[in-house]
Amino acid sequence: MSKLCRKIADAMAASGAHYVIKAPDEQKAAAMRGVLEAFRDECLKRGVPIAPGDLTYYGGIISATVKHRTALQTKRRMHT
C-alpha cells in the first residue's frame, strides 16, 4: 500500500465507520460496500492506484472502528 493510499484510508476511516454504524442492521453490508467504493473512488480521483490489499486494509480499519465504537456505546448504556 502506498503512503498516500494509507493516508487517504486513515483520513476516511472515522466518517466511514460512522456511516456503517448509523445504517440499519439490514443495510450494514450495503453501507460497508458503499464506504469501500468511496475509498476506491477517492484514491482513483487522486490518481493513486489501489490493489485488492488496499481495500482489505481499509475494510479492516472500518470494521475495527465500528467494533470499538459499538463496544463503547454499549458500555455507556450499561452505566447510565
Image (cartoon, rainbow, N blue to C red):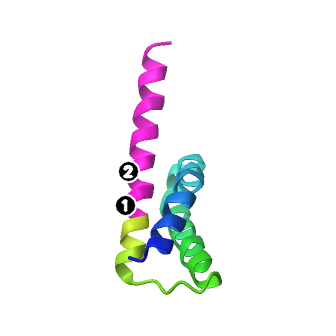
Give the prevailing secondary structure in the magenta stretch: helix
Q: CA distance from mark 2 to mark 1?
A: 6 Å
| Residue 63 is one of the magenta-drawn residues | yes
Q: Residue at x 59, y 87 (%)?
A: 47
The quarter in which the N terminus is drawn is bottom left
Question: Viewer-proximal residue, 66 or 42?
Answer: 42
Q: Kindly identify which numbered label has been placed on residue 60.
A: 1
Where does residue 29 sit, x and y in percent of width and height? 48, 63
In the depicted structure, whether residue 64 falls above or below residue 8 = above
Residue count near mark 2 (Cα–Cα under 10 Å), binned few <14, some 14–19, many ≥20: some
- Residue position marked by numbered label 2 in the rendering: 64
Label 2 sits on a secondary structure element that is helix
Where does residue 61 sit, x and y in percent of width and height? 41, 57
Question: Viewer-proximal residue, 24 or 60?
Answer: 60
Judged from this view, the residue extending furthest toward the top is 80
Residue 57 sits in quarter: bottom left
Where does residue 23 sit, x and y in percent of width and height? 58, 52
Where does residue 19 sit, x and y in percent of width and height? 60, 53
Residue count near mark 1 (Cα–Cα under 10 Å), binned few <14, some 14–19, many ≥20: few
Residue 16 sits in quarter: bottom right
Question: Viewer-proximal residue, 38 or 11?
Answer: 11
Q: Residue at x 60, y 72 (%)?
A: 38
Judged from this view, the residue extending furthest toward the right is 45
In the depicted structure, whether residue 73 falls above or below residue 8 = above
| Residue 9 is one of the magenta-drawn residues | no
Q: Are marks 2 and 1 in contact (CB under 8 Å)?
A: yes
Q: Is residue 41 left or right of residue 68?
A: right
Say how many tags the image has.
2
* Magenta stretch bounds: 59-80
